[in-house]
Structures are given as C-alpha cells and as structure tokens.
Image: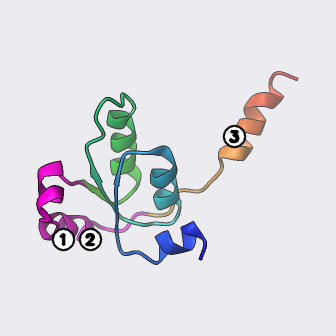
Amino acid sequence: MPHIDIMCSSDVIITKAGYGTYAECACNEIPILYTKRYDWPEEVYLNQWLQQIGRSSKLPIDQLQRGELQGSLDKVLQQPEKPAVQATGVEQAVQALLAFF
C-alpha cells in the first residue's frame, strides 16, 4: 500500500516536525499531533505554519512516553476542519526560475 494511502487512512498522525509529513498532512487534511524535535531550528516556524493551515496540537514528549494520548487526541479532533492546502510548489518553483531566463 502506498505511504500516502496509509496516511490518508489514519485519523491522526503522531510525528515530530518535518517538511514531508507536515506537507502531506496539510494537502490531505490529516490532523497531526506533534512532539518536540530537539536541535532543529526550523521547528518553530514549521509548527506555526501547521497551526495556521491545518488541525494540529502539540503532544508533550512526557505524555507520549507515558502513552497519555487521549487529551491531545480529543483536542486536535475537536478543532474545526480546514481546507486542504493546494500542492502548487512545482508551479511556484517554475515561475521563480523563469524569471532568470
């Protein structure tokens, strides 16, 4: 089964901050519980972006380690749905590159 099909079959993704997972979830309207990613400077900005465009909630690492997920799951699943992000990155990159030619 393709990875994206598995993701889309999930009610919630539990992950650390990452471009690929965040983008796939945003484009496919999949809620995310995210935990701290230490020593990664982009984390703050990626989490802010995700909170603006998708359904997401921080899952403290200590709660994850204890298996205490219910409160965070309830929080993210109760958030109103947001429209899927359109995957237009290729078109945007082409337009930016055309400016050089």
Q: In this rendering, is residue 97 above or below 34? A: above
The N terminus, quarter of image:
bottom right
Which percent across, then down, holds residue 23? 51, 52
User: Is 22 within the magenta?
Assistant: no
> Which residue in the structure is indicated by mark 2?
77
**Closer to us: 64 or 92:** 64
Q: Comparing marks 1 and 3, which lies closer to the viewer?
A: 1
Q: Which residue is mark 3?
A: 92
Q: Residue furthest front?
A: 65
In the picture, which quadrant includes the C terminus?
top right
Q: Disc 2 vs disc 1: Cβ atoms closer than 8 Å?
A: yes
C-alpha span from label 3 to label 2? 32 Å
Queried whether the magenta region covers residue 74, the answer comes back as yes
Q: Residue at position x 46%, y 78% from top?
A: 9
In this figure, which residue is indicated by the disc labeled 1? 74
Q: Residue 70: where, in percent of width, then height?
A: 14, 71
